[in-house]
Image (cartoon, grey):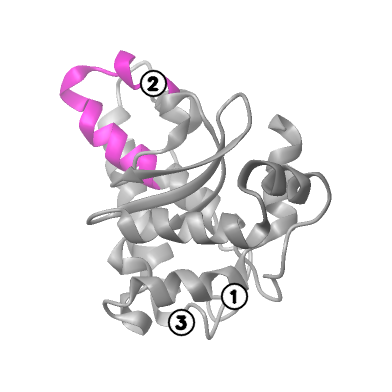
C-alpha cells in the first residue's frame, strides 16, 4: 500500500497565530507530499513497498543500500510529519496531566525544566532536524535528530517532536527559531501525547 499524506485533523488556519495558514498549506500539501512521493518511488518494487512506515524505519539496514538514504530521508519525513500534525491542535497548549505529567516531573525535575531542555535541543540542532521527547525503554529522554531521522530507527519511541526545519516556521518567525519554539507550546496537543505515552510508559 503506497504511502499517502493524511489529511490535516484541523483547518489550515486553526493554529494561527502560532503557525500561519500559508505555512500549513506549504508544509502539509507541498513538503509532506514530496516526502511521500519520493518514499513511494524508492520503495516501489522492493519487499518493503507494502510494509508500514514504522517497520521500514526500524529496519533501515535491511533496505537495499542504493535506496537506503532516500528511504531514510523521505519515509522518515512522511512518518515525522504524520505524527507532527497530530501532536498539534487548536485550543491546545497548557500542560500535561496525569501519568505523563508525573513522568515528566520525575525525569526532568519539573515541567518548566523539561520545556527548557526541549527548547535547548531544538535550538542547538544545527541546520535542519527535530527535537524529541522519547521513551528510550527505561524512561523519558530528550534527543534531537538531523534531517528527517526519527528516534524509532534507534529503538526509541517518539512521544512528541517539533520540526525545526526552516520551512516549518520561516514565514512567521524568519531566523528566530527560539521564538518559534516558545510559541509552539501553545498548540501542543497534550492528550494526544499522553495517548502515545500510555502505550509505552
What residue sits 22% from the left and 32% below the top?
69
| Placement of 119 over or under 78, stated as above or below | below
Q: Residue at x 37, y 67 (%)?
A: 168
Relative to 126, say whether 174 is above or below: below
Query: Looking at the image, which is closer to me, 188 or 79?
Result: 188
Q: How packed is label 3: few (under 14 Cα within 10 Å), some, or many (20 or more)?
A: some
Q: Is residue 127 placed above or below 2 in the rendered structure?
A: below
Q: CA distance from mark 3 to mark 1?
A: 11 Å
Q: Residue at x 72, y 64 (%)?
A: 95
Query: Residue 19 vs residue 40: left or right?
Result: right
Main SS type for the magenta part? helix
The residue at which mark 1 appears reads as: 11
Q: Which residues are magenta?
A: 58-77
- Which class describes the residues within 10 Å of circle 1: few (<14), some (14-19), or many (20+)? few
Residue 166 place in picture, x, y as percent: 29, 67
Tell me which label, 3 or 2, sits earlier in the chain: 3
- State the residue in front, 143 or 199: 143
Q: Is residue 10 found inside the magenta-colored segment of the image?
A: no
Q: Residue furthest left?
A: 66
Of callouts 2 and 1, the N-terminal one: 1
Give residue 4's position: percent from left, percent from top.
46, 46
Closer to us: 128 or 50: 128
Q: Is residue 72 magenta?
A: yes
Judged from the image, the secondary structure of the residue bearing numbered disc 3 is loop
Please report the residue visible at 60 percent of the width from the left and 24 percent of the height from the top: 137
Q: Are marks 2 and 1 in contact (CB under 8 Å)?
A: no
User: Which residue was labeled with disc 3?
Assistant: 20
Does dot 1 land on a helix, a strand or a loop? Answer: loop
Q: Can residue 52 be seen?
A: no
| Residue 48, disc | 2
- In terms of depth relative to the viewer, which is nearer, 102 or 201? 102
Amino acid at each position: 500500500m503506497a504511502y499517502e499524506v493524511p489529511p490535516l485533523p484541523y483547518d489550515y488556519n486553526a493554529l494561527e497565530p502560532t503557525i500561519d495558514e500559508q505555512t500549513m498549506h506549504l508544509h502539509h500539501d507541498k513538503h509532506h507530499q514530496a516526502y511521500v512521493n519520493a518514499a513511494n518511488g524508492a520503495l516501489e518494487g522492493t519487499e518493503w513497498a507494502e510494509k508500514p512506515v514504522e517497520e521500514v524505519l526500524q529496519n533501515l539496514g535491511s533496505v537495499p543500500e542504493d535506496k537506503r538514504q532516500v528511504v531514510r530521508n523521505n519515509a522518515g519525513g512522511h512518518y515525522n510529519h504524520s505524527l507532527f500534525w497530530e501532536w498539534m491542535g487548536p485550543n491546545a497548549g497548557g500542560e500535561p496531566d496525569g501519568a505523563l505529567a508525573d513522568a515528566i516531573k520525575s525525569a526532568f525535575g519539573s515541567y518548566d525544566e523539561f520545556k527548557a531542555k526541549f527548547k535547548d535541543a531544538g535550538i542547538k540542532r544545527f541546520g535542519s532536524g527535530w527535537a524529541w521527547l522519547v521513551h528510550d525503554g527505561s524512561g523519558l529522554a530528550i534527543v534531537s535528530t538531523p534531517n528527517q531521522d526519527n528516534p524509532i530507527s534507534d529503538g526509541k519511541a517518539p512521544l512528541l517532536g517539533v520540526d525545526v526545519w526552516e520551512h516549518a516556521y520561516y514565514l512567521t518567525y524568519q531566523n528566530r527559531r527560539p521564538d518559534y519554539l516558545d510559541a509552539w507550546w501553545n498548540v501542543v496537543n497534550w492528550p494526544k501525547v499522553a495517548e502515545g505515552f500510555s502505550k509505552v510508559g
